[in-house]
Image (cartoon, grey):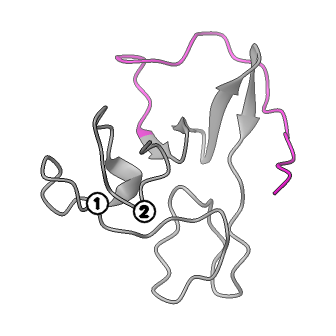
Amino acid sequence: MTTTHSAAEAHHHTHGPGCGHLTVVHGNHVDYVHDGHLHHEHDGHYDECDACSCEHCADNCALCACDDCACPTCNHGVCACEHCGGEPCTSCVCADCTCATCAHAA
């Protein structure tokens, strides 16, 4: 699948731990909630998060909560690794994750 990189506006600080913005793990990156949208660092700039393509949603994939979502970039799985305790796959950051639906798992 080809991913379109839509650059976000310029930022006056570097996002990271303690920057003051809510973070959401989404696939192989971390999105930062900033002024009503989500974006993540990519090749020295910030890209907008994918918009959910299901017919019931007007949100970003990292925040989509549709029960019947069929969007290919949303992940509504519940992490099955022993460390997460039933947290959503979008919140899992385990380095040794073995869950089949977590995109960052090896």
Whole-percent x and y of residue 53? Answer: 74, 74
- Whether 28 is drawn above or below 98: the answer is above
- Whether 79 is drawn above or below 17: the answer is below
Q: Confirm or deny contact between disc 2 and disc 1 (CB under 8 A).
A: yes
Magenta-colored stretch includes residue 67: no
Whole-percent x and y of residue 97? Answer: 30, 44
Whole-percent x and y of residue 57? Answer: 63, 78
Q: Which amino acid, by three-letter code, is at mark 2?
A: Thr
Q: Main secondary structure of the magenta part?
A: loop
What residue do we see at 81% from left, 57% from top? 1
Residue sitting nearer the eye, 88 or 35: 88
Q: Which amino acid, by three-letter code, is at mark 1?
A: Cys
Magenta-colored stretch includes residue 20: yes
Q: Toward which corner of the image does residue 52 lie, by quadrant?
A: bottom right
Q: CA distance from mark 2 to mark 1?
A: 7 Å
Q: Which mark, by number, is residue 79?
A: 1
Q: Residues within 10 Å of mark 1 (few under 14, many from 20)?
A: many
Residue sitting nearer the eye, 65 or 84: 84
| 41 displayed left or right of 29 | right
Residue sitting nearer the eye, 38 or 87: 87
Q: Quadrant of the C terminus?
A: top left
Q: Which element type, helix, strand or loop, lies under badge 2? A: loop
Q: Which element type, helix, strand or loop, lies under badge 1? A: loop
What residue do we see at 63% from left, 32% from top? 40
* Residue linked to disc 2: 101
The boundaries of the magenta stretch are 1-23
Q: Residues within 10 Å of mark 2 (few under 14, many from 20)?
A: some
What residue do we see at 78% from left, 19% from top? 10
- Whether 105 is drawn above or below 50: the answer is above
